[in-house]
Image: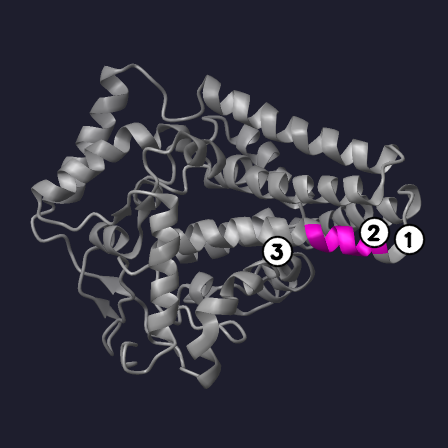
Amino acid sequence: MKNKIKFAKAKELDFYSTLNKRVDDYFILNKISKNANWVMVFKTFFYLSIFIATYLLLILNGNSIIIQFLFWGIIGFFTAFIGLNISHDAIHGSLSKHKRVNKFLSYTFNIIGANAYIWSIMHNIVHHTYTNIEGHDEDIESVPLLRLCPHQKLMKVHRHQYWYAFLFYGFGSLSWVFIKDYVKFFKKKIGNYDNKKHPKIEYFNLFFFKAVYYTIFLVLPLILINATWWQVLLGFFVLHFCEGITMAVIFMLAHVVEETDFPLPTETGNITNSWAVHQLYTTADFGRENNVLNFLCGGLNFQIEHHLYPRICHVHYKKISDIVKKTAEEYDLRYNANPTFAGAIRSHIRLLKKLGRPELAIVPA
């Protein structure tokens, strides 16, 4: 049985309390809401409009096979962008100050094939609390042929994982839609979280929305698209490969890079840092000045800010990131950030390479 994780008490209670005050003052002095602004409203309509329009063009027009595959790929990328920008904020309750609006928009996650309810447990509760802690944060749990944490078992094949890892990332959403949600929903424990009891409506939602997704993206295309069955299935695979690699890479660059820590608790379950400092050291920003990344990533390239303030809409992260960085530096705390997307990719690849070599990998505790 896993010990309950206990974070150290903040030594002077200074860093996080000071940071909270400064962040609150930013919103108060500028008279702005912590929730969505016009940029977020535009992003919501933009991503949903492109997604729906491309889907309709795919199934209602007599397109060539090449154009069909292009549309499948666009749908895949925009599925990821909807999840990252709209669903993610809504499930965190940060998109709107109105719970009903967040609840309604959280169903976009169900429509794109995932399950908002089980994700809120896995992500909001487990991942955001026990970030990068092996055996507790299931976002870094061992997957076949990949070693994403220095405390996971090393196999010979891991020596080459930095060559093939990105191929595996492309299969992530396919596994999520057909396997992961069901397994996690009926798993008795997710980390330390007791996952035995679910509201009855969530059993219905799980199977109902999965059926809706399978109908929209498999059944209707097989009926309506002018293509052979195997071409439709291949297009569906293209969708998920584009979606999977997009979502996986953004997560990896925020947590599985050379700059981040993978702390282990003591035998009694103690973590040496306070929760706020733990979030600083187990997350990393990347491409903070890249406006294209800021638009596409749903604020997850500001991962430090997101983990410290998940209830603030991501459109504000760029502004508050300077406050977080400055405050961390004042308290002599490390602020992990790769200046560019390419730099973060290189850092991730270097870490994968280290994790595949016993002489460079950290010895498991």
Which is closer to the viewer, label 2 or label 3? 2
Q: In the image, is residue 149 above or below residue 275?
A: below
Q: CA distance from mark 1 to mark 3?
A: 24 Å
**Label 1 amino acid?**
Thr
Please name whichever residue, 270 or 313, is drawn nearer the observer in this view of the structure: 313
Q: Quadrant of the C terminus?
A: bottom left
Q: Residues within 10 Å of mark 2 (few under 14, many from 20)?
A: many
Residue assigned mark 3: 173
Give residue 232's mark.
2
Q: Secondary structure at mark 2?
A: helix
Q: Secondary structure at mark 3?
A: helix
| Quarter of the figure with residue 45 | top right
Which is closer to the viewer, label 1 or label 3? 1
Please name whichever residue, 26 or 150, is drawn nearer the observer in this view of the structure: 150
Give residue 228's mark.
1
Q: Residues within 10 Å of mark 3 (few under 14, many from 20)?
A: many
Residue 253 at x, y percent in the picture: 39, 53
Label 2 with label 1: CB-CB less than 8 Å = yes
Residue at horizontal 44%, vertical 20%? 37
| Quarter of the figure with residue 62 | top right
Residue 190: say if magenta.
Answer: no
Residue 232: say if magenta.
Answer: yes
Q: Describe residue 321's horizontal placement relative to residue 59 as left or right.
A: left
> Which mark is first along the chain, 3 or 1?
3
Please name whichever residue, 179 or 289, is drawn nearer the observer in this view of the structure: 289
